[in-house]
Structures are given as C-alpha cells and as structure tokens.
Amino acid sequence: MPQDPDALMLFAAGFGTRMGALTQDRPKPLIPVAGRPLIEHALAIADAAGIARRVVNAHYLADQLAAYLDGRGVAISHEQPDILDTGGGLRAALPLLGDGPVFTMNTDAVWTGPNPLTALYKAWRGDRMQALLMLVPADRAAGHDGPGDFALAPDGRITRGVGYVYTGAQIVDPSGLALIRQTAFSLNRLWDRIAADGGLYGTVHVGGWCDVGHPGGIAEAEAMLTHPPALLK
C-alpha cells in the first residue's frame, strides 16, 4: 500500500441546516463567499497543491452540485438513499479514491496563508502516522466558538481536549473503516481507533481559517480574505 496520499475527498453532502434559508434552494458548497462558491475555494487549494484526483460526495440537492462540477474532472460519490456522514461517506468513496492514505477536506471553510494540503503533505510521515489533522489555535478559529477539539503534545500526537480546533483538512489512512459496522458514521469513530493505536497526529496551520458553516461566517470569511491575519511564528 502506498504511504503518500495522491487523492482528495471533498465533503459536500450535508444538508447545511445551520445556514438556514441560504440552503433552502441550493447545497451549502454553492453558497458564494467573496464572489466564488465555497466549493471553488476548496478546488483552488487542490489545484495549488497539485492534487489531480478529486472526489466529491453529494446527497442534498446533489443534482445541482453535479451539474456545477460537470466537466471539471471531479468524480461524484452519490450517497443515496441516505446520507452517510463523514466516515461512511469516505468509505463509500474509496473505490474512486484508490488505495492508501487520502487527503480529506470540508468544503465549508476558507483559508489564508500557506496551502493547507501542501503543508499536510510535507508533515506526513506514513511510517508512524495513521492520521494527520490540520489544526488552528482556538483563539484564531474565525467563525467558530468553543475551547477547541484537541490537545497537542510536543511529539505531535493529539488527544481529545482543548486548545486546538480541527479545520476539516487531514491526511488519513482509511483502512480502519472496514472494521466499523455502521453504514453511516462520523470520522470520529475512526480517529478514536487510531488514537488508541498511537497514530493520531496534528499539525498547526499558521495562516487564517474561517468556518463558513453558518450565515455569520460568510462576512467573517470575506473580512479575513480582505485582511488576512499575521502568520503564526
């Protein structure tokens, strides 16, 4: 099995309920931020990172998303009749993604600073890591409230705790998905298994990141893109 990722899973199947009226007639990835649909911000990051093989999962208003991506060289993993959540969605898309570890990224965030996928690739060590999550300090997580999702140890391993927010971008070895019985489940199930094996790691994004999962995040993201925060030292 190859140790380096060469394919990207873009999560785009959710109902976008936090967006309220904005997702009544379109899927969340097609909501515009700074003049471009959210999915375009994600694809631009993939372009800059040189990742040619991309898969998008689709469920809610899937026809709109598929039509928008038609001719773009993006494979669609249709989740029907039921939505599969992140873990089930990734497992269903594996035939399109190929063998070995993969990049995954949510499509409801925007970034400034170094390319997060490139940074993940540079930090990835497939001989000891089973997952590498891109994090931001909780006090730099624009559009996001709360003390964080993970604590980061000096050796790079992460555990459930506070201090850092998961940004939705990672490299993960999906082989453990085969051990989970449920059809629809969160990637948290896989991370817990990986953490128990000592293979769950994190790295910190030094630029800006904004959660655009709710209407207020749109204005915050546009402000961040106009005036990017200083890079972390």
Image: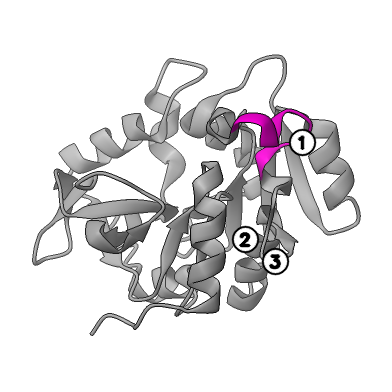
Quick one: label 3 or label 1, which is nearer the N terminus?
1
Q: Could you give the CA–CA distance between mark 3 and mark 2, rounded to whole angstroms?
A: 13 Å
Q: Nearer the viewer, residue 68 or 9?
A: 68
Q: Amino acid at mark 1?
A: Arg
Which residue is label 1 attached to? 26
Picture quadrant of residue 233: bottom left
Judging from the image, what secondary structure is the residue with disc 2 in?
helix
Judging from the image, what secondary structure is the residue with disc 3 in?
loop
Q: Amino acid at mark 3?
A: Ala
Q: Is residue 137 magenta?
A: no
Region rendered in magenta: 20-28
Quick one: label 3 or label 2, which is nearer the N terminus?
2
Q: Can residue 105 be seen here?
A: no
Q: Could you give the CA–CA distance between mark 3 and mark 1, rounded to whole angstroms?
A: 26 Å
Q: Can residue 145 be seen here?
A: yes
Do the residues bearing badges 3 and 1 touch, measured as CB atoms within 8 Å? Answer: no
Above or below: residue 232 compared with residue 126: below
Which residue is label 3 attached to? 52
Which residue is label 2 attached to? 42
Label 1 neighbour load within 10 Å: few <14, some 14-19, many 20+: some
Q: Could you give the CA–CA distance between mark 1 and mark 2, rounded to whole angstroms?
A: 17 Å
